[in-house]
Image: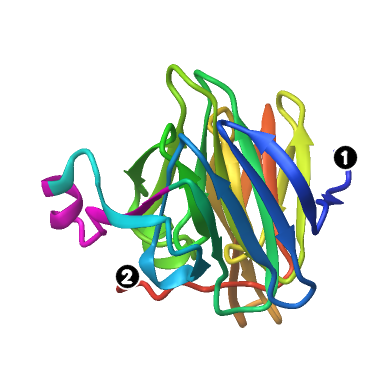
Amino acid sequence: MPVPTQLPTSARSETFGGVTYHIEGELVPALQVELSHTGVFFEHHILLWKDPGVEIGLHPMRGGFKRMLAGMPFLLTGARGPGRIAFSRDGAGHVFALHLAPGTGVEVREHQWLAATDNVEYSFTRVKGAANILLGGTGFFIDSFSCQAQEGILWLHGYGNVFEVTLAPGEAIDIEPGGWIYKDRTVQMQTMFQRLSTGLFASAGQICWNRFTGPGKVALQTMYLHIPSGE
């Protein structure tokens, strides 16, 4: 299995999906996006600053009623230019971008996404199995982002630093449940359990991890984020 490698921690004047963006800062980095014809959507609490000419409004989601029943947001915040807007999250970490080509998509751990361009579709999938939900450390849902006819950008936030590994078909990696950030849709995830024993009749409990099997990419973070099971 290849060793995970650290992703770049900064970006300057990167242009893709109809916008230009910059990522700067060492401890709590900020994402700055230059808007023209393409807008972005995001969770409202991560907005840092904007030019006065940038318009802020609601960004409705598909399947709003289904999302409401699941306890997830069905109205997000959107911004349109021209002008600049910046985002940051309240936590030391690493901001990075995923450039999504038409027909591609990724699955993201809850509470890890920062913003996305308007041409990215946002949905969710339910984590299957009571053991995966209660003990797997991922939560009830996994966010799903994809691009259909146009390319787009998804910006994610990882706690600590972010590393990425590309798995060949059949290759696998075990990651602590709070450690993964995103995976390609082609990567399979399974919650694994190992019982720890101190003797013939004694048990010291068990540990669990998420096993990811390729082909595809997986990203992990060096600071674990454990999501309460009630979320």
Image quadrant containing the N terminus: top right
Q: Earlier in the sequence, mark 2 or mark 1?
A: 1
Please state the total of marks drawn on the protein image. 2
Residue sitting nearer the eye, 204 or 78: 78
Residue at the limit of the structure toward the front, as seen here: 53
Callout 2: SS: loop
Residue 198, above or below 71: below
Can you give x and y, in whole percent of width and height, for residue 180 in the image? 62, 56
Q: Nearer the viewer, residue 67 or 193?
A: 67
Residue 131 location, x and y as percent? 40, 59
**Image quadrant containing the C terminus:** bottom left
Give how far apart the Cα atoms at labels 2 and 1 are: 34 Å
**Residue 103 x %, y %:** 50, 18
Q: Residue at x 71, y 27 (%)?
A: 170
Q: Tell me: residue 198, above or below residue 8.
A: below
Residue type at the position of mark 1? Pro
Assess whether residue 79 is covered by the magenta stretch: yes
Q: Which residue is mark 2?
A: 231
The residue depicted at 78 percent of the width and 51 percent of the height is: 11
Q: What is the span of residues highlighted in magenta in the rendered image?
A: 65-80
Mark 1 surroundings within 10 Å by alpha-carbon count, few (fewer than 14), some (14 through 19), many (20 or more): few
> Which residue is label 1 attached to?
2
